[in-house]
Image (cartoon, grey):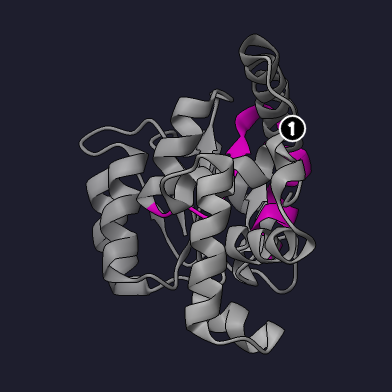
Amino acid sequence: MLADDHGIVRKGLRFLLERQSEMEVVGEAGNGREAVKMAEQLRPDVIIMDIAMPQLNGIEATAQIVKRNPEVGIIILSMHSDEGYLMRTLTAGAKGYLLKDSADADLVRAVQAVATKRPFFSPGIAKTLLEDYLRQLQQKGLEDSYDLLTEREKEILQLLAEGKTNKEVAALLNLSPYTVETYRTNIMQKLDLHKTAELVLYAVRKKIIS
């Protein structure tokens, strides 16, 4: 499903997607409120959501849609590459973040990734965030906090950042969910992170997920 207040943008996105035999555009919304209503009716696998829309912005629309249907994969379409916007979209429940200037090159890959429950971020996002992160480390006189993690913690960090639950990680690694939660707590403490969105953002910065 497409959600953008510019008809010409929706037309361009539809053209790119429907060239793929396995993809079908089931609906188009022109504002955030319409997107929420249409998502409830159509139950699409993936929604491409413009961040700036009338009546209800893309971030708030995403939060409402994900609350009603946690399985839907939402890709935010934005002109902004700064951390503030990305953090807000991740907190709202988006699974992908696509910069408008690279949409023609990355759109199909983004939809394929999110449709299979994998996150996707425009390549430029990781580069920008990594540069900001390294600058912060230099200012604080700190070394790379990633090196504080054990091999097992690094493994679990990636799985969590990919959107897997504690139960799913436990099954993959033959651990108990309680053990995974303990690892998760240790990872968050070592990296000075406080919520899942920050963990995903950290993984994007470090190019652990792409």
Decide if residue 162 is on the left or right side of residue 53.
Answer: right
Report the span colored magenta.
Answer: 93-112
Specify the quadrant of the image occupied by residue 38. bottom left
Tell me which residue sits at (58%, 42%) in the image: 191
Residue 195 location (% of width, % of height): 41, 49
Q: Nearer the viewer, residue 50 or 26?
A: 50
Residue 194 location (% of width, % of height): 42, 45
Type of amino acid under label 1: Asp
Whether the magenta-drawn stretch holds residue 29 is answered as no
In this rendering, is residue 100 above or below 135? below
Decide if residue 52 is on the left or right side of residue 190.
Answer: left
In this rendering, is residue 150 above or below 77? below
Q: Nearer the viewer, residue 169 or 163?
A: 169
Residue underneath mark 1: 144
Decide if residue 27 is on the left or right side of residue 99.
Answer: left
Q: Nearer the viewer, residue 121 or 176?
A: 176
In this rendering, is residue 32 above or below 69? above
Mark 1, secondary structure of its residue: loop
